[in-house]
Amino acid sequence: MVVFAVLFVLLAVLNFCFPAFGWYLRYGWMVKGHSEPSNAYILMCRISSVLALILFFVFFIPVIFF
């Protein structure tokens, strides 16, 4: 259970710091030529990462450690 918690936090932090990397893994390989994710996509990735971390720390951390 602790391994899952560490992995979840690590992935959420990486998605917050490097949101374009996830876009390239999911969509970038399908596009021929040079294409970039939009600013809205990057903003939504960062917002969703922060919300996921907040929900994780509020609901799952107390269950794991207490």
Image (tube, grey):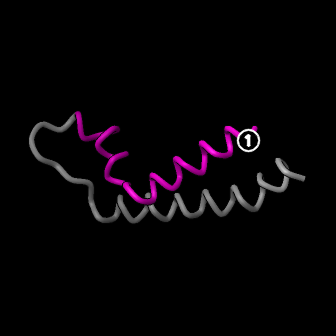
Q: Position of residue 6 (x, y in %)?
A: 64, 45
Rendered image quadrant of residue 2: top right
User: Residue, x 16% and y 49% (percent of image)?
Assistant: 35
Q: Is residue 62 left or right of residue 24?
A: right
Residue 49 lies, with reference to residue 8, above or below; the image says below
Magenta region, mostly helix, strand or loop? helix
65 or 60, which lies in front?
65
Q: Is residue 4 left or right of residue 41?
A: right
Quadrant of the image for the N terminus? top right
Q: Position of residue 31 (x, y in %)?
A: 18, 38
Residue 21 lies, with reference to residue 16, above or below; the image says above
Q: Which residue is mark 1?
A: 2
User: Residue, x 67% and y 39% (percent of image)?
Assistant: 4
The segment highlighted magenta reads 1-29
Rendered image quadrant of residue 16: bottom left
Residue 36 within the magenta-colored segment of the rendering: no
